[in-house]
Amino acid sequence: MDKLKKSKAASLAKVATLMRKRSDDLDAFLTADPKGKNLPGYLGELSNHLAAEQSTLLQEMDLLINNIDHIKNTVAMQQSCAKVSGVTETVKVADLVEDASSNCR
């Protein structure tokens, strides 16, 4: 969760906002303004960073899925062992009452 909170994806939104603000003179911004001149290099670095971030998050997602599957299998196994099993016997109520009353004497 911390990695998502610290993601550099928000930086991309800042770049997009900056470029929208300068859309009328984008060519001059990219060639003359110091911030604009740094933008292509910054975008390249940001792209590399986001690709590495994505790779890490995908690996963590795979681990999480594996752990969840393990938990599901464990719960399923426990539930299959916990099923009620036993012998069902049909008895006459009169016999049951007679047996109970003879044991109380």
Image (cartoon, helix red, strand yellow):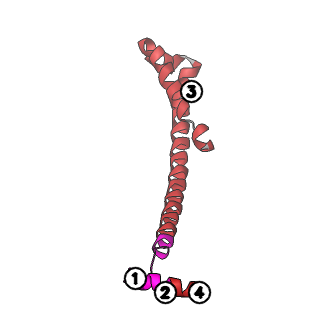
- What's the amino acid at mark 3? Asn
Of badges 2 and 4, nearer the viewer stands: 4
Residue 94 marker: 1
Query: Label 1, label 3: how many angstroms apart (C-alpha)?
Result: 96 Å
Q: Amino acid at mark 1?
A: Ala
Distance (Cα) linking label 1 and label 2: 9 Å
Q: Is residue 56 magenta?
A: no
Graded by Cα atoms within 10 Å as few (under 14), some (14 to 19) or many (20 or more), the crowding at tag 3 reads few
Q: Which residues are magenta?
A: 77-100
- Report helix, strand or loop for mark 3: helix
Which mark is on residue 99?
2
Give the distance between the C-alpha atoms of the residues marked 2 and 3, in whole angstroms.
96 Å
Mark seen at residue 105: 4
Identify the residue at image location x=63%, y=42%. Answer: 2
Numbered disc 1: secondary structure? helix
| Lateral position of residue 4 relative to residue 79, left or right | right
Tag of residue 86? none
Where's the N terminus, which quadrant? top right
> Which numbered mark, 4 or 3, is in the foreground of this view?
4
